[in-house]
Amino acid sequence: MRQPIPFPLMKDKTFFESLNEWIGDIFYDVLPEKGYDERDEQIFMAFQIEQALKEKAVLFAEAGVGTGKTLAYLLPAIAYARYKGRPALISCADETLIEQLVKKGGDIDRLNDLFDLKLDVRLAKSRDQYLCLQRLEGAQKRSDAEFLDDIQDSLPEFVNKTYSMQNTFPYGERSSFPDVTDDEWQQVNYHPIQNCAACDLRNKCGQTIHRNHYREATDLVICSHDFLMEHIWTKETRVREGQTPLLPESSLIVLDEGHLLEFAAQRALTYEVQERTLLEVTESIMVDGVREKTLNMIEKSIDLHNEFFRTLRACLIQSGEDRKGIQKKPELIALGKELVRHIDLMMEEFVFEGELYTIPEYELKMAEEYFELYIFSMRLFVEEGDAINWLEVKDEVETLVIMPRLVTDILDEKLFDGKVPIIFSSATLSIQKDFSYLSDSLGIFNYQSFSVPSPFDYEDVMKVVKHPLHQHDKHQRVFELFGSKEQTLVLFKSKEDMDKFKQTLPQEHGVKIEFEGDRELSTVVREFQEGQFQVLCSYHLWEGLDLPGEALTKVIIVDLPFPPKDPVFDAKRKFSENPLEEIDLPFMQLRVQQGIGRLIRTSNDHGEIHLLLNEDELAIEHLWEAILPVHAENV
């Protein structure tokens, strides 16, 4: 049931005048009476958000660690949502940060208890965070792995039996399977080739049940940047096809760790052609009764597709990055065009097969949708244009990725259109109070902004240590730093770099270490906070990780996190007059600031930051030293 606005509305005052007074009462009087510190930075942020709501503006709200950003945006957001009659949408950098925001004892939980708000908060996770019953069934046919039996045994009774819909409830989230590795999960989670609309298990699907649940939220819907972007890109198409948009209409949007929105937008706007998927899709429709002509065309499609990927591998630009650039040689383009022409003809044959009902309806519709997207993606690849292309391994499958470059134009049209207020919240949105890197990356030219510092005295609680090293000596130094037995977070600039370190560890190292990807991440983070192991190695947790007190007292940054030399960043550099100053340095500086920000989360925290620096990194010390909270000491 929808709850009332948390303050009375007067006839002689507007909503925003009343909101302004309520914010003042809360932060100046009520919170201090309940034992909370009065923080000028937090109060200033709350009033700036109130003004942005009034003007439906885009606001860059940069507030240092310890400001209390979450409370500063939640209170105005909840009041505004109830005033507008639509939920506020809180978008986080990823699923792990969502779990931290809604955890027991977290900011939302405490806020609810403090003011008895009776909050209606619901999670809207990305589709790949949910179990797919069709893919689980397929995996069980291919393998007898123990984790598949564990997932099957955990399913609610209504999945495998006939019950009324009144007995269904949300299930099947990634976080429900903490011991399943990321690689294992990618065998059974939702995959874009699945045709959910035609699935006969749709009414029992955990993703469907979750979606129906969060669409009815009245106060807060919390999602990831990836899912918000997917919602924005697909909204018009879904409405046109008679489907409900992925997310409900919102009163405002808060982008927590909003500096990562650009990368989510790029990921959502990519099109993919996977080497193995075509074979999997066609196998499902090569059934008894299919006409010989259709079978021959399917087999030729498989042959052409395999030949295309063989040629593609020969055209790769070799590098150590995950994303491999592609030389568009004439033979590759010619093969791609032939493949598109052939599949166009094959799709015509599918029409005849549909009339004969020889192929099960679900499999045929899934194949048709798959090949429609396949043709669209391949045409983007073979045509001249400004799309960015690369090859990478996803879910252990070689994948051609095509990304149209004009992300900023689409964001301007579909997100930053002035219809709802949008609040960017983070400790690092600017480079020394200059917001141009973020605004240019997202194509935002009309915005409000402010930057307030952290209330912590870093000189008293933080030590930054520089380690001059040869690059090949860094892994040994990381291992040596484990000897102090402190709770330690090790940050790598890529998964590849983390995996290399993992391979160099002595077999009998005697240190309790967890690596990102070996288990479900939010579970690993919770166990790390509880002190169940000493070292957490990650390439992903540069931002948003909240581990106060003794849960984290040492952070090791193995390499300065410059952006990769991959096709995406190469394209950004190509369109920049000064790539080093406009692209590479701001990215690295923001990332370092975020990594350092993991250490001091409360006024009682303390610890050390260790920067491992090779000769090249030391040579540009003047470019990154200014962003450190305290002067760095030599080891």
Image (cartoon, rainbow, N blue to C red):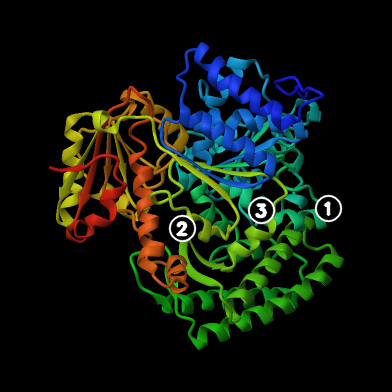
Report the side of 508 relative to 209 (left or right): left
| Image quadrant in which the C terminus is located | top left
Upstream in the sequence, badge 2 or badge 3?
Answer: 3
Mark 1 Cα-neighbour bin, 10 Å: few <14, some 14–19, many ≥20 = few
Give the Cα separation between the discs numbered 2 and 1: 39 Å
User: Which residue matches tag 1?
Assistant: 242
**C-beta proximity under 8 Å, tags 1 and 3:** no
Mark 2 Cα-neighbour bin, 10 Å: few <14, some 14–19, many ≥20 = some
**C-beta proximity under 8 Å, tags 2 and 1:** no
Give the Cα separation between the discs numbered 1 and 3: 22 Å
Whether residue 157 is visible: no
Amino acid carrying label 3: it is: Leu
User: Which residue matches tag 3?
Assistant: 415
Q: Nearer the viewer, residue 280 or 310?
A: 310
Q: Residue at x 48, y 76 (%)?
A: 312
**Closer to the eye: label 2 or 1:** 2
Q: Nearer the viewer, residue 224 or 46?
A: 46
Image height of 201 relative to 566, above or below: above
Give the Cα separation between the discs numbered 2 and 3: 19 Å
Amino acid carrying label 1: it is: Gly
Amino acid carrying label 2: it is: Tyr
Q: Nearer the viewer, residue 78 or 354?
A: 78
Q: Residue at x 53, y 77 (%)?
A: 308
Residue 437 marker: 2
Upstream in the sequence, badge 1 or badge 3?
Answer: 1
Report the side of 240 relative to 268 (left or right): right
Upstream in the sequence, badge 2 or badge 1?
Answer: 1
Numbered marks: total: 3
Q: Name the residue furthest right.
A: 355
